[in-house]
Amino acid sequence: MDEIAALLVRMKELEAHVYIYGPAAEDTIRQLEVAFGRQMPPSYRAFLARFGGFSILDSSYSGIIDDKIEQGRGWAWTDTRYAREWCQLPEHYLVVQPDEDGFKCLDFGRVGPDGEHPVIYHMPFRKTPFNELNPSYATWLTEDLKAMIAAWEEIP
């Protein structure tokens, strides 16, 4: 998570509208696991414990905010429940980033030898309902932030 923290520092230098919600307590992480019915993978658990969640402009990286597992947009459990109601999101997906076209989710239907679940992009109402993005949350988030920083650094 140190690399992600460093990337967020750089992101804040490039964009004032970066909000890190703060660490989630272990008890609250367990509440999310109970509500979802599955244990969080190691890298997402570390993300929640260190950052809770964050947003950049109008993009949310869903998690736990103010030590609550649900309330509004940006809370992983709220985003997941919304997606289940709106587009019949499969029960084994946990939303980690909603956007205007779909939902980036942890796919708890698959697990790697390291206990990580892949991040997929669920695109409701498409013939191909999902696209695998990365085998772990930490790797996906690191690559996503690096790409965003690279694009923003090119803007004069």
Image (cartoon, helix red, strand yellow):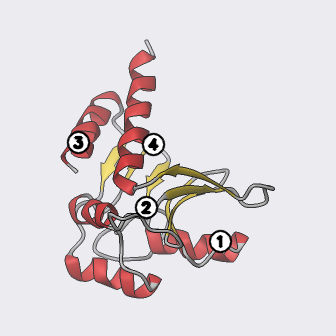
Residue at the farthest front position? 113
Q: Which residue is mark 1?
A: 89
| Nearer to the camera, 71 or 29 | 29
Q: Which residue is mark 4?
A: 57
The x and y percentages for residue 72 are: 48, 69
What's the CA distance linking mark 2 and mark 4? 14 Å
Q: Which residue is mark 3?
A: 3
State which tag comes first along the sequence, 2 or 1. 2
Label 4 amino acid?
Answer: Leu
Check disc 4: other Cα within 10 Å, few if <14, some if 14-19, many if 20+.
few
| Nearer to the camera, 28 or 72 | 28
Label 1 amino acid?
Answer: Leu
What's the CA distance linking mark 1 and mark 3? 31 Å
Q: Which residue is mark 2?
A: 62
Q: Is residue 15 above or below residue 95?
A: above
State which tag comes first along the sequence, 4 or 1. 4
